[in-house]
Image: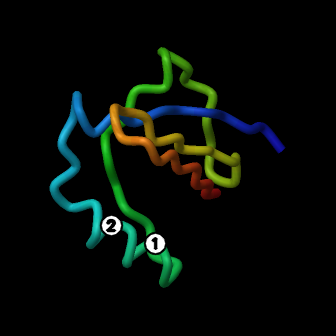
Amino acid sequence: MPTYLTNWNPDKWKWDSLAEDSARTRTGLPVAKTWSMGGTKSITIGDRVFLGRQGTENESEMNSGE
């Protein structure tokens, strides 16, 4: 299974619907967002994507989805 890693920095891009989007994905429902993956066009349904949270905070976070 193809796997991809992307990052999100809340200091550079505000994700105003993060709480709602997180709650939705926990129930198994998809959330449509525009996201850059470095120009790749080969990501398809069923591929695994990891999202890393970066920034000036001392905590880090890593999530994944298919």
**As shown in the figure, which amino acid type bears the numbered disc 2?**
Asp
Task: Say which residue appears at 61% left-offset and 44% top-offset.
Answer: 50
State the residue in front, 43 or 58.
58
Name the colouring of the figure.
Answer: rainbow
State the residue in front, 42 or 10.
10
Local secondary structure at mark 2? helix
Residue 16: % across, % down: 16, 55
**Quarter placement of the N terminus:** top right
Residue under label 2, please give it.
Answer: 21
Vertical comparison of 11 with 15: above or below? above
Vertical comparison of 23 with 55: above or below? below
**As shown in the figure, which amino acid type bears the numbered disc 1?**
Thr
Task: Say which residue appears at 74% left-offset and 38% top-offset.
Answer: 3
Residue at the extreme bottom:
27
Residue under label 1, please give it.
Answer: 25
Local secondary structure at mark 1? helix
Left or right position of 64 against 19: right
Left or right position of 54 against 49: left
Residue at the extreme right:
1
Task: Say which residue appears at 47% left-offset and 48% top-offset.
Answer: 59
Task: Say which residue appears at 20% left-offset and 61% top-offset.
Answer: 17
Q: Quadrant of residue 8?
A: top left
CB within 8 Å, label 1 to label 2: yes
Left or right position of 57 against 38: left
**Quarter placement of the C terminus:** bottom right
